[in-house]
Amino acid sequence: MDQPAPTAGRPGPPAAQLPLRQRLTIPVLAFGGILMAVMQTVVVPLLPDLPRLTHSSAGAVSWTVTATLLAGAVLTPVLGRAGDMYGKRRVLTGALALMTVGSVMCALSSDITVLIVARALQGAAASVVPLSISILRDELPPERRGSAVALMSSTVGIGAALGLPLAALVVQYYDWHTMFWLTSLLGAVGVAGVWWAVRESPVRESGRFDVLGALGLAAGLTCLLLGVSQGGEWGWGSARVLGLFGAAVLVLALWWWQQLRTERPLVDLHLVTRPRVGLSHVAALLTGFAFYANSLVTAQLVQAPKATGYGLGLSIVATGLCLLPGGVTMLLFSPLSARISAARGPRITLALGAAVIACGYVVRIADSRDLWMIILGATVVATGTTLAYSALPTLILRAVPANQTASANGVNVLMRTIGQATSSAAVAAVLTHHTSLVGGAPIATLHGYLLAFTMAGAVALVAGAAALSIPGDKAPGDTPLAGSRTGSARDDALEGA
């Protein structure tokens, strides 16, 4: 019979003495996080060939990426809130199941409409990490929680680094549907693993689910991210893009007003506006921007033709292998992040991670012609990302009540997603404006890539400054009082500390 979850702040039994199911909780949740990241990247090697394979246009094919981005951004805070209210394991299992169903649909069809719908279903898996982190807070004693949360945060980078070469190998040597059959099998294993090894958390938020708030947030985010993701193709000054941005401002302003007046809101804005939480979200957005440029630019740089004078002309498989050391580094450095956070506090870890990201871009600016220097620079950026991403959920866990951890971490992941989408648009704009003709085709210049590195490094430094401005951390194991929408006097006193 399973032992009860350890009380917060009280050491639990050694891991070796726990039942098998409880010992597998962390590996199973980490597997789900890696699988989510793999699922987001597996379509990338297919993008050049999908128009031919699906008999559709390149613009239609791009929606296989955009649909996942939009669905993930919208569903992450919504499912996080649902997990806080109705059970984190239940919602986590549902998110993984939707991801698996989407993968099966991709495996069975070559119709672009079906593929876009399927990829939107897979976007639900973006909530896996915040839900898993909330489960870890509820289930683990404080001495094991830090390293587990750090590992869970790193699964995003680990899965992305593994997914690209894996997908490229499958696509190169097998029918492309095989890749989705493989991810369907892995998804089914993930669902079964969570159902078997993860216990349902007893920590719940009472009240009714804020349906109106969920619809308002979905509408506002869809307008915002659709404008950001399609601005380069439609034109930043086009009526469609400006209309989407205007609609986003209006809808989100109304949503903010509605949230402040709802008894049980989807997002507790009273918590969000506190410096400890709000600045953590700002740092997440900036870190997401800085980190994402690394993967985008590295992939394009090493695949550029040798005729450019700087490109290496590598295949998509070789490109994925260039990013693989970064994924391994993220796995190795996640325990270090937990130790630094335990000793100095997560805001110091976050600031250090941002500084390391900036140093990585200095390496990229110094030399982006030699393969080993490119790999070194990309790996340094990945190392900084590990430190930063591992610290962010710890900051949130220390700043919000236990019954709001999934929704609060969902908002934090949402801010990372917005940062990544903005980074993608900004990098595309820079590279588009710095091109030269190579073999009759416009190719980004090395100067354009260096500008993108400079931009990302500067944003990383701003993220570090935001991290240092976060009010001092509470001591590990000091848990905010649960159940208070606007916070308690104790929380207010800690906020001003």
Image (spheres, rainbow, N blue to C red):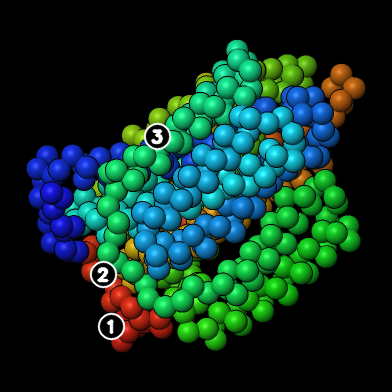
Please, what secondary structure does the residue beneath circle 3 have?
A: helix
Quarter-wise, where is residue 204 in the image?
bottom left
> Residue 396 location in percent, x, y?
39, 63
Please, what secondary structure does the residue beneath circle 1 have?
A: helix
Seen at 23% across and 69% down, the residue is 478
Seen at 79% across and 24% down, the residue is 52
> Residue 45 location in percent, x, y?
64, 27
**Cα distance, mark 3 to mark 2?**
34 Å
User: On the picture, is 309 further left or further right than 349?
Assistant: right
Of the residues under marks 1 and 3, which one precedes in the sequence? Answer: 3
Of the residues under marks 1 and 2, which one precedes in the sequence? Answer: 2
Seen at 28% across and 76% down, the residue is 481
10 Å crowding of disc 3: few (<14), some (14-19), many (20+): some
Residue farthest toward the front in the current orientation of the protein: 108
- The foreground one among 60 and 296 is 60
**Number of the label disc, if any, that sits on residue 490:** 1
Q: As shown in the figure, which amino acid type bears the numbered disc 2? A: Thr
**Number of the label disc, if any, that sits on residue 479:** 2
> Residue 404 location in percent, x, y?
39, 69
10 Å crowding of disc 2: few (<14), some (14-19), many (20+): some
User: On the picture, is 351 further left or further right than 476?
Assistant: right
**Number of the label disc, if any, that sits on residue 189:** 3
Please, what secondary structure does the residue beneath circle 2 have?
A: loop
Residue farthest toward the top in the current orientation of the protein: 173
